[in-house]
Image (cartoon, rainbow, N blue to C red):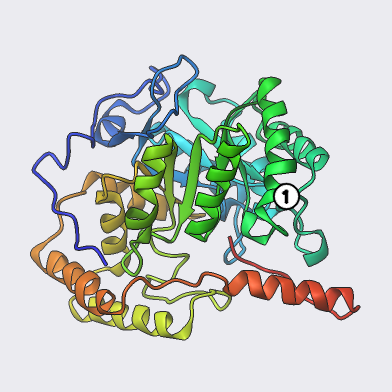
Amino acid sequence: MLSRPALSRSLSRALSTAVPSTYVEGFHEPELTKKMRYRPLGGRCVDTKGNPMIVSILSLGGSSFGGMYDGGAVDEECIKICQHALRSGINLIDTAAWYGHGRSETTLGKALKDIPREAYYLNTKVCRYQPEVMKMFDWSYDRTLKAIDEALERLQVDYIDSIQVHDPEYAPSIDTVIQNVFPAFLEAKKQGKVRQLGVTGYPLSVLREQIEKAEASGIQIDTCLSYCHYSLHDTSLKTDLVPFLKEKGVGLIGASPISMGLLSNRGPPKWHPAKDKLKNLAKAAAEVCVKNEVDIGRLAMHYALEEESIPTTLVSTKNLKRMEENLNHVYELGNLSEVEKNTLDYLVNDLFGSHGDQGWEGVEVTQYWEMIEKAKRGEEVGTLSTN
C-alpha cells in the first residue's frame, strides 16, 4: 500500500483553480467555479478546439441516476444534481446504457438539454444492456453502432466525447472486443458521433490488454476508466497502471473512491462482491472512525482527490445534499483536522496497509459464467446488479 500523499500548501502545480475552457459566462456560478480544482486529463485527450482537456478533479457519475445501487432515484432530483454540479464547475459526466437500462442517459438528456454543450465533457458506455443474463452483453459491430445512436438520442446531444466499452472482462475474449466493438467506435468517430475511444473494466490487466491489443491493431485508445482501484484498501491503480497509461498517452478517469459503498458507516450493499476479509476490514475501519468521531467517507474522498496522478474521480449520487457534500470535499481539500489526518494514516498504513491491496477481481465474472451455464440448461437465474 502507498502512504497518504503529502500535500504542499498549494496542493500541487498540477492541481489548479484556473478557469477551464468549459467555463461559460452566464451559465456557471463564478464563485463556486473558482473553488473547483482542475487537472489535465492527460495523454492525447483534447477538447473540440484541439487544446488539452482540463477536467474537474471531481466528476459526475450517472449510475445512481439509473437507480443502480439501491433504486429509488427520482428524475427531478437527479436533474437538479446534474445542473448544480455543472454550474459549480464540474465539467465531466460519465454514464452508460446499462445504468437503469437507458434511464440514466434519458435523465441526463433532460438535465442537459438547456445547458451549453461546451460547458461539459460527456462520456458513455456500450456493450452492456439488459438485466437478463443471456441478453446482458452484446459485443457485435451492428449493436454497438445502434447503441451509440440510442445514446445520442437519449442524451439529446450531437456527439459523445468518449465512447467506452463497458466491462469487457465479461466478453468471451478481448479479441472479440478488438475485432467487433472498436471498429464500430471508429466508424462512429468517422461520422462525427464520438470524439474519443475509451476502455473500462475492473481488472487492471484487462485495461492494459485492451490498450495493447488495440494499439497492435492500429487503433488508438484515448481514455481509460478504472474504478475501486485507488481507495483506502487498494492503490494498485497508481502503482500498476498509471505509468503504463502515461507511456501510451491515455487519459485516466478514476471512480468510486468509497468502493461502491464499502467504505461507509452503513456498510456495503448485500450484492457487494468484496470477500468477507475485506468487508470485515472495512467494518473495522468504520468503527475506528466512529470512535475517533470522524467520517470514513470524508477520509476516503480526500484520499482519492488528493492523488495528483489521477486527474479526476467519478462519484455518483441521487441526493442533492450528498452532492453538496461531495463538492465540499473539493473546497476543503488539504484541510483535514489532525485527528482526521492521524486516522487516515492509520487506516491506510496499518489497518488496510498491513494486508496489501485488497479487491475482488474475478468474483463477478465467475458468477456470470456460472449463470450463463445455468440459463443454457433452462434453470432460472437472476442478474448481476453491480457496475
Give the image location of residue 279, x and y in percent: 42, 81
Q: Residue at x 60, y 40 (%)?
A: 214
Amino acid of disc 1 = Thr
Give the image location of residue 302, x and y in percent: 26, 56
The foreground one among 154 and 10 is 10
Is 316 above or below relative to 269? Answer: above
Q: Hey, which quadrant is residue 197 in on the image?
A: top right
Give the image location of residue 65, x and y in percent: 58, 51
Q: Which residue is mark 1?
A: 176
The foreground one among 102 and 148 is 148
The foreground one among 237 and 193 is 237
Note whether residue 38 is visible: yes
Q: Residue at x 45, y 68 (%)?
A: 261
If the image is split into quadrants, where does the N terminus sit?
bottom left
Q: Hey, which quadrant is residue 365 in on the image?
A: bottom right
Give the image location of residue 195, x and y in percent: 58, 26
Q: Residue at x 42, y 34 (%)?
A: 249
